[in-house]
Image: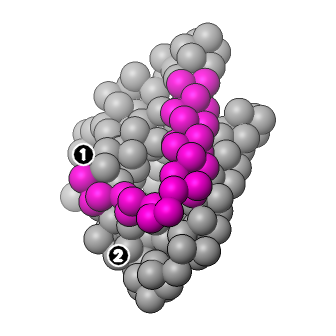
């Protein structure tokens, strides 16, 4: 049983973090622009699932292994950088097509999941943030999952709203070939920017 006062402290802090523009929000924005509202929500769900995987891993104590072994951290990080650059390259190539194919919800979900799972900074953030609210006298894993679930739910709501807004805009403009070209290049810039953020931020 989580202390209600602890929850009242955690929820506003988690919401403030969710409202701060970051990689997840930018990714949902990009997927919404490329594939519309359904793709945006699919990407959002993939990101949320990836976040819960990180929460579970951190709760089981495996996150400490990543934090203690820089080589493992770097291997995961550079895998994430390579994946984001590959997405950027695909978007840039698609921007030259007469009719840029929209991203499907299934693909958006898969890409959102992979982008989150290959970002080891997520698990380090979980290890730094959630333990501040844990009761060491209680079971740790259920507390991790509860607090992580609240964090993921906030992300679903905030990132989903951003993605849906972008998806609605894309749906109205997608008939324009010029817009499709600009959209592909914009998506490429977003993915490349996320790759640079993951590569250079310590």
Residue 51 in percent (x, y) is at: 39, 47
* Mark 2 Cα-neighbour bin, 10 Å: few <14, some 14–19, many ≥20: many
Q: Which residue is mark 2?
A: 37
- The question of residue 36 being in magenta is answered with no
Query: Which part of the image, by quadrant, shows the N terminus?
Result: bottom left
Looking at the image, residue 4 lies above or below residue 110: below
Q: Which span is picked out in magenta? A: 77-106
Judge whether 31 appears above or below 115 on screen. Answer: below
| Residue at 45% in and 81% down | 175
Q: Residue at x 24, y 53 (%)?
A: 106
| Along the line of sight, the residue nearer the viewer: 7 or 57 | 57
Give the camera-side residue of 160 and 8. Answer: 160
Q: Is residue 95 left or right of residue 44?
A: right
Q: Nearer the viewer, residue 80 or 169?
A: 169
Per the image, label 2 sits on a secondary structure element best described as helix
Q: Nearer the viewer, residue 190 or 97?
A: 97
Residue at mark 1: 142
| Residue 6 located left or right of residue 13 | left
Q: Position of residue 75 (x, y in %)?
A: 56, 17
Judged from this view, the residue extending furthest toward the bottom is: 172
Corner quadrant of residue 39: bottom left
Residue 162 seen by the camera? no
Residue 119 visible: yes
Quadrant in which the C terminus is drawn? top right
The magenta stretch spans residue 81: yes
* Image location of residue 100, percent across then percent down: 46, 61
Label 1 Cα neighbours within 10 Å, binned few <14 / some 14-19 / many ≥20: some
CB within 8 Å, label 2 to label 1: no
Q: Quote the CA–CA distance across marks 2 and 1.
A: 33 Å
């Amino acid at each position: 049983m989580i202390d209600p006062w602890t929850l009242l402290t955690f929820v506003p802090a988690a919401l403030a973090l969710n409202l701060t523009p970051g990689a997840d929000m930018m990714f949902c924005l990009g997927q919404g622009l490329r594939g519309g509202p359904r793709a945006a929500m699919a990407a959002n769900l993939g990101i949320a699932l990836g976040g819960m995987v990180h929460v579970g891993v951190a709760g089981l104590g495996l996150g400490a292994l990543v934090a203690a072994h820089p080589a493992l951290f770097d291997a995961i990080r550079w895998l994430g950088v390579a994946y984001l650059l590959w997405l950027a390259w695909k978007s840039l190539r698609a921007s030259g097509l007469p009719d840029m194919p929209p991203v499907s919800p299934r693909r958006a979900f898969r890409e959102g999941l992979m982008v989150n799972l290959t970002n080891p900074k997520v698990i380090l953030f979980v290890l730094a943030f959630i333990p501040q609210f844990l009761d060491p006298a209680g079971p740790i894993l259920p507390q991790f999952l509860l607090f992580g679930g609240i964090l993921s739910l906030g992300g679903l709501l905030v990132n989903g709203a951003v993605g849906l807004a972008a998806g609605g805009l894309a749906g109205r403009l997608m008939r324009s070939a010029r817009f499709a070209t600009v959209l592909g290049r914009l998506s490429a810039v977003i993915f490349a920017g996320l790759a640079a953020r993951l590569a250079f931020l310590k």
